[in-house]
Each structure stands twice: as structure tokens, then as C-alpha cells.
Image (cartoon, rainbow, N blue to C red):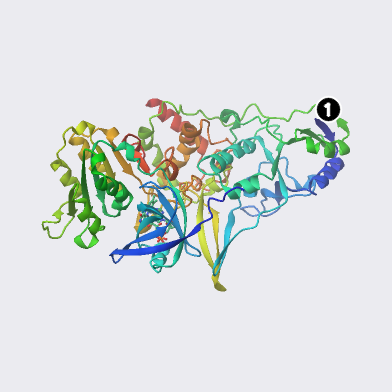
Amino acid sequence: MGYRLTKKGLNAALTDLSRQYKLYAPHRYVNQGEFSDTDSIRYGEIKTADDMELLEKSSHTFKEALIPISETFFFFTEDNIKESERIHTGAVIFLRSCDLHAVKRLDEIYLNNGAEDYYYKRLRDKVKFVLLGCVSSFENCFCVDMGTNISTEYDASLDVRDGQYYIDCKFSDWDSIFQNNAEEILDVVPSHVDQTTIQVSLPDTDTINTEKVIKNSMWDEYDTRCIACGRCNFSCPTCTCFTMQDIFYTDNGKAGERRRVWASCMVDKFTDVAGGGSYRNKHGARMRFKVLHKVVDYRQRFGYHMCVGCGRCDDVCPEYISFSHAVNKLSRVAKEG
Amino acid sequence: MRTNEYAPFLSKVLSVQKHTDIEYTFRMAYEGIVKPGQFFEVSIPKFGEAPISISGYGDGYVELTIRRVGKVTNEIFEYYEGDSLFIRGPYGNGFDLDDYRGKELVVVAGGTGLSPVRGVIDYFASNPEQVKSLKVIAGFKSPSDILFFEDIARWKKTSQVILTVDCGEADFECSIGFVTEHIPKLKFEDVSKAAAIVVGPPAMMHFSSLELMKIGFLEKNIWISQERKMCCGIGKCGHCKINDVYVCVDGPVFNYTKGKTLID
Ligand SMILES: Cc1cc2nc3c(=O)[nH]c(=O)nc-3n(C[C@H](O)[C@H](O)[C@H](O)COP(=O)(O)OP(=O)(O)OC[C@H]3O[C@@H](n4cnc5c(N)ncnc54)[C@H](O)[C@@H]3O)c2cc1C
Ligand code: SF4
Ligand code: SF4
Ligand code: FES
């Protein structure tokens, strides 16, 4: 069912929702940007419509709400292992179409690839999604080419036009919440973009000669350009890699914990094995590994592309390395055969 | 109840066999079906986890042959008979004995690479009627690095074993040279139907496979086992991924036709 709400109405609905859920949405952190006098737009817990940054793209994604940057699995005491406590409140995540498509990628790895991930599943079961409509595309986005510009599998959608908020609610439990606060009941179709300024042409993953592409010199430029900082991975809504860590608490060596921490295939040590061995030492090889994963081998394994075209990797790279540019080059190289 | 695959369980150390100063085999209590070439994540709370291959198995136990090289494995060496370690698994595909039944089988192993295939060799050495023939080429750096002396002596009763060291003195037990140098000396009735398992460091597996093909082995009759950094063992952490393959769930054992396409 669709609804039109005023800001006051939306705030009342958000208050209702927050009785059951924590609400996560893009939030503008003033003066907390990377550079002087710049803001940072990241996910945070919100209470009101004004807490949400609905006009710009967030540099960080929602995924922290599903895969915390550092997540404790077990607490250790001298002779006991205790599982970390589950969170009982549900969560509502406000996100754009590309990011909602990214959730499918997270699910694929954490729920379907090998055994189900217990910690992901216990958070995931409690999460609902509100789609934020996109009126026009942002810098570096290429969702249309990735087929992620339209989303239909949301619990509700939210669009803001002329100070009015438009909601399409698909989760019937919420209808009363919106209905109680609505000005009008009407059909609402969330807005989406049909074109982006950046365009990518994708390689044909059925015919690509991976060995040849890997050996192509196109990756060499990244040996020196890329500084292996990993920001492209940490800002990517589809990256899922982590490292397991055991730690001692410094004040009490007998206690400690086992946790997982986000990891990046662009950063040193990702492949290190005992005795000094490691793979993909050159940064170009890491770039190649990442790009092929996003637009070649993930599709070969799961049937659809991993990258959702959000453009955040390009937004955040300190060396101005363009992922979409690399994909286009890869497609040319792959065609040459 | 949903199971937490990350939750390790306690397993008692039934016995410890010392091969070298840095390589011990821990026989651990375990009830359940395992395959040679699968692995467990062995852990010590506050130190961490390490993937370790199953080097042998039997009623109520699995054997893990561990080389001490760092944080976790050093700590494991502080554990003895009667103590318990945390383990979770088994993970990975392991070797499928049916791939080798009724064939002329050769196993080429380098160093600790012998441990994931030890279960396969043990099985066919004890059930020699299930293969046409069994040959083993086991290579080590030096005589003091040799693992599984007693097993090798037992295997020799029913199979041809070539024990070789990279350098040192040859005696009638042990020859000199890399494993690859011994491959051309092997004799088969019909090499095009013979099967081979090659396990060891990446370069050793590469050159041994090439050498096997030179004497007539078909690619599809060669199997290798890969080792990569692994944090989860269940297709989540991404560390072991190569191309479209997760070594922990799709491997670590690969037929060479797939194994050769994996480029790090
Ligand atoms: C499928 C598989 C089977 C293995 N079988 C055996 C075996 O039978 N016997 C044996 O002695 N060793 C085996 N290894 C190697 C063993 O896992 C490493 O030596 C061990 O993880 C080192 O841990 P550490 O903490 O002692 O060393 P550190 O150097 O302190 O380890 C640092 C980190 O790197 C990781 N790591 C280091 N080396 C490896 C590696 N080769 N593979 C995966 N992760 C690594 C560890 O998880 C750890 O987090 C196997 C590895 C794999 C992947
Ligand atoms: S690879 Fe880049 S564009 Fe694609 S989903 Fe990840 S951050 Fe977005
Ligand atoms: S953000 Fe840029 S410099 Fe940093 S690892 Fe990614 S490509 Fe390299
Ligand atoms: S070990 Fe984690 S994905 Fe393979």
C-alpha cells in the first residue's frame, strides 16, 4: 500500500518503528570528513527524518549493520568458551537500490556458499529494508549497466518530493504504522534512474580467457599507482572477506576472545601463509584479483555479477584509481582474445 | 537449533608421535566419518586457529601431523597425551578413494605434503587387492626431515616406495634427488589409465605433474591438493579463493584439469 506523509507524519512513523527496531540510515557527520571542512556521510542510528541524509550518496555502506567491522564470536575465560550474546532488537536499514542488490550478494556468501554463517544469520533474520528512491544518479555510479537500478524486494520504500514523503509499504505489519500517520493513501512507485554518466561494458564471462587476461599487461600500471590501502574493499557493499583473530585481554591474560575483523584482498598479508609464503605480492595482481572477482569469476560461480555499480570504490580511492575504467579496459582486452 | 559452525569442540589427545623436533603427529579422539585430505581447524583459545590435514584415521580417532611454525602451532606442541585441543571440521572435499580403485596408482609427495595423502596410501597399502599396483615417491629436504618412517617401512611390504632426499647421503633405504627425477623411472602396464596424486609445495606439484604427463599420464588422471591461507574453512572469509574456486569448500583436492587453471 502507498502513502503520502508530511515530515511530522514520517517522524511519528519513525518513532513507532523505533519501538521495535533500531533504524540505520545515511547520516551527515558534519566536519568529520576526510579533509578539512568536509562532512562524512556514513550509516548511523537515526530517530527523525532530519537525521537522514537523503540527497547524497554515503561513502560508507550499510553493511556494518549486518557484518560489524569487528564481531566477537566467543569469549574465553580460563576454562570456558562462551558464545557472544545475540542482539534481540530488530533493525531497519534505509538504503538505495544498488545496496539492496548488494544484500543478495552478502546472503549468497554468508548463507549459501558452504555452511551457513551463524553470526550473520542471527543478525540477518532481524533486518528489514527500506529502499531510498534515486531521482538522478550520483558521481561514479553505473547501476544501470549492472542491472541494479531497480529494486522490488523491499519491505518499504521512501521518496522525498517537495517536502512530502512517499512510501510504498510491502510488509503488511507496517501498514497500520504508516496509515495512522498518512495524509493520503495512493499508489507509490519508488523512483529509480535509467541512465548514469559513467558507463561500463562488461566482459563476456562465458567466453573470457581468464589465463590470458591475467597475464595481460593492463594490470601493471596498478603496481605503482595503487597503495594497497584497501579502502575500495571496505567501502564496497559486496565485499565480505574477514580474518579471524584471537586476543588476550591485556589486564587479564587468562581471558580473551575470538572475533572476526574485516579484511581486504588489496592489503598486505591477505594471503600470507606460515613460513613466509604469500601470493599476489604485486598491487596490480591484487587489482586484477578484485576486478575479476567483481565482474568475472563471481558470475561464473553464482550466475550474476557481484559488483552492483555503486561507484564507491572510485569515490574513496586516494589514488584516483577508477574501477569502472578498469572494467572497460578489461572488456576490451577480453574481446581481443 | 541452528548450528554454529565456528564453535569448536574439545577433542582429547590420545597419543603423540614425534617424527622430528618440529613435526609431531597428534592422535585425537573423534567419532565420525572423515576422508583423507580433509582438514580440521585446530584451535587454542586466545592463540587462534590453524587448518590441519587429516593424516590418518581409524575407529574413534583422527591423526593430525603438525609442523610448528608460528603462534598456534607452537602452542599446540605444549599439549600432550591426556590434554584436550579444540577442533572443528572436517572441512573440504578430501580424496575420493573410488577415483583410484582398480588402477595403477602413484603418489608423489613432498615434505609435509605426505600427511594429507598418508590416509590414502595407508588404505591401499593395507588393501593391496583394491589397486592394480601402488607406488609412492616421498621426498624430503634432508634425512632428518623424513616423516612417517614406520609407515614407510610397512608400506614397502605391499608397494614400491622410493624415499628420496634433496641432499645428503644416499643409502639403500633412501635415494638422492628431487621427486621429479624419480618419475621417469616408474614402470606402468598402461600409463594412460594410471592415476597419480601429487601433493607438496606449489612448484613441486607443477613440475611433478608435467613430468608425469611426459611419461604418458593423462591430465584427468592426476589429482593435487592445494594449501592456502584459510580463516574459516567454510567459504566465508575469502582468503583461500582463487578464480571462481574456494579451496576450503571446493578443494583442497583438485583434479589437475581444474587445478591447473587456478592462477593466484
Ligand atoms: C588445507 C590445509 C591443510 C594444512 N595441513 C597442515 C598439516 O597437516 N600440518 C601442518 O603442520 N600444517 C598444515 N597446514 C598449514 C597450517 O595451517 C599452518 O602452518 C598454520 O596455520 C600456521 O599457524 P601458526 O599460527 O602456527 O603460524 P603463524 O605464522 O603464526 O600464522 C599466522 C596466520 O596465518 C595463517 N596461516 C599461516 N599459514 C597458513 C597456511 N599454510 N595455510 C593456512 N593458513 C595459514 C594462520 O591461520 C594464522 O592466522 C595446512 C594448511 C591448509 C590450508
Ligand atoms: S566494486 Fe565498486 S562499484 Fe562495484 S559494488 Fe563494490 S564499491 Fe560499488
Ligand atoms: S582504494 Fe585505490 S589505492 Fe586503495 S587499495 Fe583500492 S585501488 Fe588501491
Ligand atoms: S577458508 Fe575462508 S573462504 Fe576458504
Q: Amino acid at mark 1?
A: Leu
Identity of the residue drawn at 67% across and 48% down:
A41
Question: In which quarter of the view is residue A312 placed?
Answer: top right
Is there any visible trace of residue B200 in the rendered image?
A: no
Instruction: Determine whether the beta carbon of the residue marked 1 sits less than 8 angstroms from the nearest atom of ligand 2.
Output: no
Number of marks present in the image shown: 1
- Residue hosting label 1: A186
Image quarter for ligand 1 equals bottom left
Give neighbour class at mark 1: few <14, some 14-19, many 20+ (Cα, 10 Å).
few
Q: Is residue A121 or residue B238 the one in the foreground?
A: A121
Task: Measuring from the top left, give residue B238's x and y in whole percent.
Answer: 48, 46
Task: Measuring from the top left, give residue A262's x and y in whole percent.
Answer: 54, 52
Chain identifier of the residue bearing label 1 in the image:
A
Identity of the residue drawn at 60% across and 38% down:
A102
Is there any visible trace of residue A32 in the rendered image?
A: yes
Left or right: A137 with respect to B93? right
Question: In which quarter of the view is residue B63 placed?
Answer: bottom left
* Residue B25 in the image: above or below residue B35: below
Q: Secondary structure at mark 1?
A: loop
Task: Measuring from the top left, give residue A285's x and y in whole percent.
Answer: 40, 43
* Residue B156 in the image: above or below residue B251: below
Left or right: A147 with respect to B212? right
Q: Is residue A137 or residue A151 the one in the foreground?
A: A151
Q: Is residue A104 or residue A258 the one in the foreground?
A: A258
Task: Measuring from the top left, give residue A160's x and y in whole percent.
Answer: 78, 36
